[in-house]
Amino acid sequence: MNVKVLVLCLMPCLMLSLQAVAQGFAGLGTAAGDFSNPLRGRVLQFPADHGAHPDFRIEWWYLTANMTGPDGTPYGLQWTLFRSALAPEEGAGWASPQLWMGHAAVTTRDAHFVAERLARGGIGQAGVTAAPFNAWIDDWAMAGPDFGNLRLTAAGAEFAFDVDLRAQGPLVLHGDAGYSVKSAAGQASHYYSQPFYALSGQLTLPSGDVAVTGQAWLDREWSSQPLAQDQTGWDWFSLSFDSGDKMMGFVLRGGQDYTSATWIAADGAVSALPDGAFSAVPLARSRVAGRDVPTTWGLRLPARGVDVTVTALNTQAWMATSVPYWEGPVVVSGSHTGVGYLEMTGYDD
């Protein structure tokens, strides 16, 4: 039996396992069991922590980018590699409990192109190495001599991209030195970002090739139970202001919403803001893939004088993948102007 046939035979199990990873974004509120848990005070180690943490249940390498073409036309780009473990013990070959899922997308004002890859760990289909850095699934890759100098590639039925990423600032540790609390009950993840990439390269779309330049933001996160049992999804914002300052903020929805934010000054100085300091209120909804999804938001971070409206570039940026969610570029207006990305999970009905 060849590898493709084996993958097809195992695909139903793979799909069920991936869909059982979270509640809201597929059961992330279920107990961690024998998996490792994030530890407050653990010092993140680089480049080692750019790599995989197989003793944790869930992990991702998540890149989004705001770009423009030569004529100023805006575009958005997403490339994500998810790792999910069925068990905390590692195994070789097909015995590896690691499951991998890749998502890639390009968004324009009028279209949203999406592709997905699914893979088993241990057989070379997907994986991540820390130094030199290489994250791949099938023929998609984010790789380079180090985390600050990367080439990013992916292709779907109607699109492709090949872009270079060059870090222009430091890594950002969210929460307490990378220990990011997600609920009043204390669920947490290890979470850091590289929000200072300069991007250049090429998109391939049905209308032809487009040279693009812009800025990209890479999120790294791993945990084994990052949500509380009553949390059903999240609204996550990464904003890059024209001033050079940046902001990350999220709302975890549940019986009692939980918020967190990070202010990133243009020089890379970081300030973590606690639950309640950041607010996000839906201002308008759009009918997307048969459901009502908020696509215009009012965001406030009074400690930094932020009072902005965030509007989707394309309201129909629905990721119709194995675990569906909304992900797309946004435009920022109000007290601050700029661009960014919005991710919303748990709007499945």
Image (cartoon, rainbow, N blue to C red):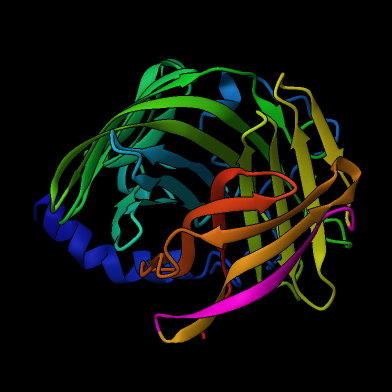
Query: Which corner quadrant of the image does residue 142 belong to?
Result: top left
| Camera sees residue 179 | no
Residue at the spot 78% in from the left edge and 23% down from the top edge: 269
Q: Position of residue 75 (x, y in %)?
A: 36, 47
Q: Residue at x 37, y 38 (%)?
A: 68
Between 189 and 339, the one lying in front of the other is 339
| Residue 76: percent from left, percent from top | 40, 47
Nearest the camera: 215 or 190?
215
Number of callouts in the render? 0
Question: Does residue 275 appear left or right of residue 73 in this picture?
Answer: right
Residue sitting at 36 percent across and 66 percent down? 321
Is the magenta region chiefly helix, strand or loop?
A: strand
Q: Quadrant of the image for the N terminus? A: bottom left
Magenta part of the chain = 276-289
Tell me residue 118's x, y (percent): 31, 55
Identify whether 214 is placed above or below 99.
above
Residue 280 among those drawn in magenta? yes
Residue 184 shows up from this direction? yes
Left or right: 295 with respect to 164?
A: right
Indicate whether residue 116 is drawn in magenta: no
Decide if residue 22 is on the left or right side of residue 325.
Answer: right
Which residue is situated farthest in the left direction here? Answer: 1
Left or right of 53 in this view: 1: left
**Place of residue 108 in the rendered image (x, y in percent of width and height, measured from the top left):** 33, 55
Residue at image coords 49%, 43%: 62
